[in-house]
Structure formats: structure tokens, C-alpha cells
Image (spheres, grey):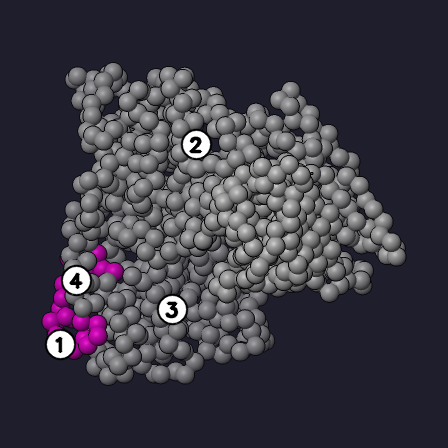
Amino acid sequence: MISRVLLVVCLSLRVANSMPPDKVPIHIIKARSIDLNNAHGLAMETRLDKVVEPTGYKLDLEPYLEDAVFKGHVAINVTWLKEGNELAVHCSHDLEILESEVRAHFPDDTKESRKIVINKWSMDPKKPIYTLYLERNVPKGSTGFLKFSFKGNMETSSMEAFFKTTYTAPEQEVERVVAATQLRPNNARRMFPCFDEPGYKTPFELSVVRPRNMVALSNVPVARTENIPDEPDAVTDHFEKTPPMSTFTLGLVIADLKQLNNSIMYKDELGNEIEIRVWGRPEYLEALDGVNEKVIRVFKELAQVWRVPLPLRRLDIVALPNYQGVKPADNWGLIVFRESDLSSRGYLQLAQELSYQWLGAFTTPAWWSDAHLNKALVGYIAAATAFKINNGSEMEGKWPLTVLYSLYYEFSKRYPHSRITGMKQETACTKIELLFRMFNYTLGDETFKKGIRMFLESRKFKTFTGDDIWNALNTAALEDGRIPKDIDIKTVAQSWITKDRLPLINVQRQYDSKTAVVTQKVYLRERPHDVPEAAKMSWLAPIVVAQEDSLDLKNTQPATWMKDKKELKISNMPEKSKFIVVNPEEIAPYPVNYDQDNWILLSNFLQSDKRLMMPELTRAKLLHDAWNLAYAGELSFATAFNMTLFLKNERHHLVWDPVFTMIDHIGRHICQCLQGKFQAYVRILLSPLYEELAKDEKEDEEAWRKNLRALTKSFLCKAGYKPCIREAQEQYSKWMQAKNPDEGNPLGNQYICPVFKWGTMKEWEFGLQRVINFPPSRMQSERTYLLKTLAGCPETENKINRLLNITMLEGNGNFSETDMFLIFSMLTGSSGGYTTLFHFLSNNWDVLKERYSSRTNLWDNLITSATSVFTTEEGLELVSHLYITHQGEFGSAEHIIEKSMRNIREEAKWSAENLPVIEAWLDKYLANSDVKDDQFYKN
Ligand SMILES: *[C@@H]1O[C@H](CO)[C@@H](O)[C@H](O)[C@H]1NC(C)=O
Ligand SMILES: *[C@@H]1O[C@H](CO)[C@@H](O)[C@H](O)[C@H]1NC(C)=O
Ligand SMILES: *[C@@H]1O[C@H](CO)[C@@H](O)[C@H](O)[C@H]1NC(C)=O
Ligand SMILES: *[C@@H]1O[C@H](CO)[C@@H](O)[C@H](O)[C@H]1NC(C)=O
Ligand SMILES: *[C@@H]1O[C@H](CO)[C@@H](O)[C@H](O)[C@H]1NC(C)=O
Ligand SMILES: *[C@@H]1O[C@H](CO)[C@@H](O)[C@H](O)[C@H]1NC(C)=O
């Protein structure tokens, strides 16, 4: 498939939130705190043989900051779990072990421990494992220690392990040094020999030599600082002993830092007693103003969520100069942020990092394969906390819609994750985050919290697996009578986690008996719907039902659970004249279809003045479900369009948010024959909203308002809104009048697409000349952008033909093969584009074939782009005609055009069913509309 680049990107808007995931990354703010990309590799890692287990580390470090090297000694207390004469520890190849020593106290020894002779030692050439071969067997139950002296280099090219970086403060010429660690996930072995697996939790006693004029911070407070004989400029900080913890949560920072204001002493009735300090470089403290207060608010909320006190006396939060790590270093008791992350607005990231103090450090995933569960629960708790503190403003109030809609689009594809494999882990994690949200609703807030508290209480200072969480939730749910006896949380969770699919729940009310029949099947949006095993899939989905007279949604306990059964009946439905909503608030991640009468009741209610009794998330869901079900072929478009009628009075941005994605999807999918009418509909839908938003533009307005206005404007502009296009042309004329237009473009990117789409040939030609004359010294991405808009924005044939002539026929040397790929890809984004490309191919067949058929990549791509995106019977005829006319001439693309025809046949069925319905609905709507439509250019 060709990746279609959205035309609206021309207006460089943040449509990110509702766009399907192949166009924009999901997880805009959130994907920072755990190495999911690494998780797979880590899951494969060889574990150490369990001959001994560590029970404590004494680590003395002596870094030489100037030279970026360090020396150290580590003494690891161990207990022999079985008899053996070999010992292995993790140790990276970059670390050099200078001396080793082993002492043991045998169980039957009366005297003190004895030295065990080391016969030989070796470093595994492939794996970071260092093995000691002992002269004799040490019996099971012995205790003792391993001692190593070692030296190593600090990392200077990345911010991992024990690294060094430098920065120069503005207005001060001196370069300053920063040393710090990021040991997650398995970098401790790059700093000292150790048992580098999360399951080994032990106390650490750290000492570190630092320059006298700098600060050293670690997981716990400094117990004492010692002078060093003959070294007036350095001292040794001895830190207190830490609580038992995993190696990756050990942390260290040495830098020129100052504390922001005073420490906060936080004490509560739960047993927390902790000093919280915020640090930054002196010049940056001003930017951090207010962070203390934010930290304390978040900490307080989280302490109340977990109710298990953190066993820390002190928590340091650092804005580390020049820290570029992809994620904050969330050491236990020492969180290291990028400067801009700590000073940024919002609470989400802070809530995430603080949550890791409980979930991640206090209790820890047993292995990296469980890390996504940790991340998912942290994600849920952080979002819930940030929203509680910062309601509407956090992520513009869009959680969980941002992530939820991405899942809906991804999992309903024929091949989920087919394009971006790295995303699979990320979506899996998001899905689990939404499952936690589902359990919060279905078990109730109190029971849910009780469950996760029980979980933490039983796993603190230990590690956990998914089962520990699910079982604790289950116990809490049973105790509180929140789930039926024959349901168990783990089985429920598994039914969602094990599949890259989501269910579609269909509800058919039987009005006479006041019952409803509920069925489930795999939710598929893209055609064809022939997914293997589809018939076998089922989910344990909670069926929460809201009725017209109980819309406050205080009770979100499911009426029932969809078990393995595909079908069940629910009773106590309201009378005929009252609607029901299943899965309100997107409690579980699934769309819902209804019988037509219930849809009509919903549509009428939403158009009434009681509309606001229904929460906005549910209003958005009904709209989003209806459109996507129609797109999927599950629901009549007349019903889906009816569900948009209430938008006339709707002003909540959450409800509008999905509308833009839908306009884009449907606009792209319907034939060219309906574009004019569809655009008229879009204009009538959007212009009242835009005019209202345009009236009260303010400097300090909320971010959602700015974004909604910009989105509305860009879509209107695309639909031919005159004021917007005139403005764009005025701006563009500045460029046309510039003395040296090739030096740079003086106008905002958002103006270019409307001019190329609605402006004159002359304006468009000027843009083309800029691409042709683009100086090599300028950023090539600007040229790419211009070329994309030149190809993707116009829908009229002559502009597109001119571009194809010059690039494909005239052989203008300014266009590379990559450019042609880009042009084809843009043309597949609209019916005007790919239809013109098709005719161009067909009219110039001989020349094109002669010139390009031997360049198979390009040729195949041309054939795909020109033939695969049609959706109608007429399109099928065009393509079939080309196929027959040139049978045997397609070369490498023979199978491509055959596949195109199969796909179009499938899509044509959809069009044959849906286009007449759409057209009839639009005709009626346009005829009855009282909105003035003279502010528009029309196709
Ligand atoms: C190691 O063991 C010794 C002797 O039992 C003990 O004094 C010391 O505190 C232990 N070290 C750590 C870091 O637990
Ligand atoms: C905290 O420190 C900042 C920066 O040094 C300063 O501007 C602010 O007034 C201080 N606030 C309080 C409450 O002391
Ligand atoms: C959140 O909402 C409450 C009540 O609706 C309001 O009092 C509070 O100021 C809001 N908080 C923020 C940060 O907007
Ligand atoms: C958790 O569930 C309760 C209902 O029990 C709901 O009021 C609350 O908003 C939910 N919290 C989140 C973060 O979804
Ligand atoms: C759509 O709404 C119109 C007007 O309210 C109504 O006449 C029509 O039956 C509805 N169509 C569907 C399919 O719900
Ligand atoms: C493209 O080239 C063809 C033949 O060379 C010519 O007839 C046509 O007018 C050209 N179209 C445009 C828009 O330049």
C-alpha cells in the first residue's frame, strides 16, 4: 500500500490527536519512561545462574571528571543458594576488572570467614558475563562477599550508564561538567560488576569522590562527607544505606546544582515522611519556579492512591543541564529530568515519573517482558492523577480519546501494525492502560484502588508479574461483590491482551419485551473483512448500559459481562420512547452498533436541548462509532449523517475532535462525483463553528480553542472558504513579488496549500518554478514540502498534468526518482489526483512504458498509484479497460493491476451500496439548509 500523506498537513496543524496512527505518532507526550523498544531484546537476555544471590553492595566510586574515567571498588555480600565452585556476575566489556576476591563463611564454620582461592577468571567474549572459577566448592548456605576493583570510561557519546556531559551557561565562558547515571534497563554492569537483574533487590552503600564545589546526589541522603588527604579540591560523600532495590534504580548525579527554594517536608497519616528537594543549575532556577508546589501536589495525590508509604526519607528531583536522555532517569529517590521537561506546564509527566517511585522501584517487574504492564499501570495512574489536578487543561482534556481512537483505527485494519512494527509494543501497552481504565469503571474507583494497594502491599521490595496485579484486582472485586462469581479478572484481561483486535458489540433491542440481544464479533473497518480465525475470537467485554433517565453515569457497574458466548440477552430495557447507550464514556475499548430505532432516539435526543445531560465523551463516542461503522459497512450512512446533525449546536472540542478525521476519511473514500456535495456539507457543518471561534480570539486562551479554530479554518479553507483563501493569496503575493524568491519563503506554510488548490495556474506555476530553482544550500525538507503541496493540493487536471508532464515526460533533470515517488503518493490522496494520474498513464502509455518499465520500483509504484485507489464501478471499468488494452505489457506490475482490480471490486460493492444513500442524504440536507453558502468557491 502507498502511504498517503494527509493534505491537511499543508496547514501544519496539530490534528495529531484524532488521526489514525499511520499518519502521526500516537502517544505524543507519554512514551518516555521505559525501554519498550528494548524490551524484546532484554526478554531474550541470558540470566545468571543462581549459584549465589546478592544481599548487599558496598560501592566506592572515584570518577575523574576531566578525563571521563573512573575507578571503583565493590564488595557484594552474597549467600550461596547451592553448592558450587563457579561464580558469575554481569560486567560489561568496557569495564576492566583489576582485582577480585572471594570470602565465604561456611554453615558449619565456627570461626570467621575464609578466603577462597580463585584459580582462574574469564570474560565471556560475547556476553557481558565475568566468571570466577574457585579452587573449591563452597557449600550451600554459606555467606560471604565478592570484591572487585575495576576501572572504566564514562560514557560521553550517549546519556546511558555512567555518563559525562558538558555545557556552557549563557554569559559565562566556562565550560561545566555534569556526571550522572542512567542505569535502566541493564546498564549498571557498565558501571560496576553486579548481579544486574531486576529480581535481585538489595541495599546499596555508595560513596563517591566529587569536586568540593559541586553537589553529589544519589538515592538516599549523604551520611557524612570526608576530606581527602592531600586533595584540597575533592571530598568523599558517603551516602546512607538504601532500602533493598534493583541495580537499575541506583542513581548518581554530580553537577553544579543549587536547590530551588527550601525543601518541602511532606508528612502524612499514611506513614510517609519525606523531604522533597528540587535542583537545577543556578541560572535555570527561575524557570523552575513553582515546581516545588507542583511536585508536592502530585506526590500527595499519588500517596493517597497507593496508601503504602514510600520507604524513602528524601526525594531529589533534578533538572539536569544538557541532559538529552530519551526519558527521565527515574532512579529510586532521585529523578533526573531534562531541564525543559521539568519546567514545562502540565502534570502528566511529573505524575508518571513520581508513579515509578512506587511502581517500578518499590515493586518492580520481574523481568523486562513485564515492563509494558508496569508502564501501562503507571500511564493510567498518571493520567488519572494529572486529570484530577489539572482537569480540563491536561492534554486538552483528550485522554483517553487520543490513544483510544488510534487503537480503533489500528486494530480494525486488515493487517494491524503492518507498516510500523515498532509501534506494536506501544499499542499493546496503550491497550492495557485502557484495560486498567475499564477495570476502574467496572469495579468502581474504590475497589480498583483497593486492588492495586493490595497488590503493592504484597509485592513491595519484591518483583511482580501480570498475574500479581490481576489476582489482587480479582480478590478485591470478589470481596466487594463487584464481579460475578464466574468471571475472573485475569481471564478478562487475557481475552483483551492476547489479540491485536477489538470487538464490535451489536445491540438489537426488542421493544415489546423490553429486552435486547447483544452479540460480538471482530471489529474490522478496512475491507476486505476476511480475517483468519475471525469467527473464533471473543472477548469478555463488560456491558455497561446507560438509559435515558440515568445519564449521570454514577453507576458504571456492568449489567452483565459478555462471556465466551457470542450472544446474550439483557432485560429491564426502558420503554420504546427511551434510548439506551451501551459502553458509555468508552468504558471498554469497543464500538457499539444498535438497531435503527435506537439510533433515531439517540439522534433526536442529541438534537434536543437535553443534549448536555449526556457527557461529552459519550456524545463523541456515539458520533465516532456511527461514522466508523458506516465506513466499515455496518451501518447506513443516512444514520451516520443523522448523527452529525446535532453538531449545529455542539461546541465542546472533545466532540468536534473526531469530526475532522471523519471528514478526511470519508472525503477521500467517496467518488469524485460526490465531492462537490460533500464539500458543501462540510462548509455548512463547519462555518457556524468557525465564525463563532473567530469572534472571540484571545491572547491567553486555552490551547484547545486555538487548535479547534485552526483545524476548522484549515478544513473550511480546503472546502473553498473565500475569506481564508483570499488571505492565503495575499500572503502568497508577497512571495511572488520578492526580489529573490528563491532565497526563502516569507509566508507561513499554512497558506500554501489553499493557494495551490484554489488559486490560479500562475500562482501554482510560480511554486513549481521555486522547486525547479531550489538552491542546494537551503534545507531540502522545504523543497520536499513544496513539492508535496504542489502535487497533493490541486484537484484540477491541468496543474497535475503539468507536473506529470514536466517530471515524467519532459525529463526535467530537477526531479529525482524519489520526487516521483512522492508525487505519486500525494496523488493517491484524493480522487481528483489519482484519476488524473490514471488518465495520464493511459494517454501516454507507450512513452511511459518505454521509459520506465525497466525501472521496476518506479513502474510498479506508478501502476499501484494510478490504479489501486479507485472505489467505484466506473473506476473498475477504467482500470479493467487499461488492463485489457495493454494485456501482457505490464511487466513486473502485472500482478499489481490484478490485485488492484480485486480490491476495487470489493470497494465498488461498498460504493454501490453507500454512494446512493450518501447522495440522497446530502441532497436533502443541502436543499433544507438555511446557511448562506455564498462565501465559498466551488469545484
Ligand atoms: C555486608 O555484610 C556485612 C557483614 O555481615 C555487613 O556488616 C554489611 O552491612 C553488609 N553490607 C551491605 C551493604 O549490606
Ligand atoms: C523560589 O526561588 C525562585 C528562584 O530563585 C524565586 O524567584 C522565588 O521567589 C522563590 N520562591 C519562594 C516562595 O521563595
Ligand atoms: C478544575 O476544575 C475545578 C472545578 O471544576 C476548578 O475549581 C479548578 O480550578 C480546575 N483546575 C484547573 C487546574 O483548571
Ligand atoms: C474511575 O471510575 C469512576 C467510577 O467508579 C469514575 O468516576 C472515574 O472518573 C474513573 N477514573 C478515571 C481516571 O477514569
Ligand atoms: C434521518 O433523519 C431524518 C430527519 O430527522 C429522518 O427522517 C430519517 O428517517 C433519518 N434516517 C435514518 C436512516 O435514521
Ligand atoms: C502535457 O503534455 C501534452 C503532450 O506533450 C500536452 O498535450 C499537454 O497540453 C500538456 N499538459 C500540460 C498541462 O502541460
Q: Residue at x 46, y 44 (%)?
A: 367
**Residue 111 falls in which quadrant of the image?**
top right
**Residue 174 falls in which quadrant of the image?**
bottom right
Q: Is the CB of mark 3 within 8 Å of ligand 6?
A: no
Question: Could you tell me which quadrant the C terminus lies in?
Answer: bottom left
Q: CA distance from mark 3 to mark 4?
A: 23 Å
Q: Residues within 10 Å of mark 4 (few under 14, many from 20)?
A: many
> Is 789 on the left or on the right of 206, as rendered?
left
Frontmost residue, 853 versus 597: 853
- Which residue was labeled with disc 2? 469
Classify mark 2: helix, strand or loop: helix
Give amino acid for label 3.
Answer: Leu
Tell me which label, 3 or 2, sits earlier in the chain: 2
Tell me which label, 2 or 1, sits earlier in the chain: 2
- Which residue was labeled with disc 3? 822
Verify whether residue 874 appears in magenta. Answer: yes
- Which residue was labeled with disc 4? 901
Give amino acid for label 1.
Answer: Gly
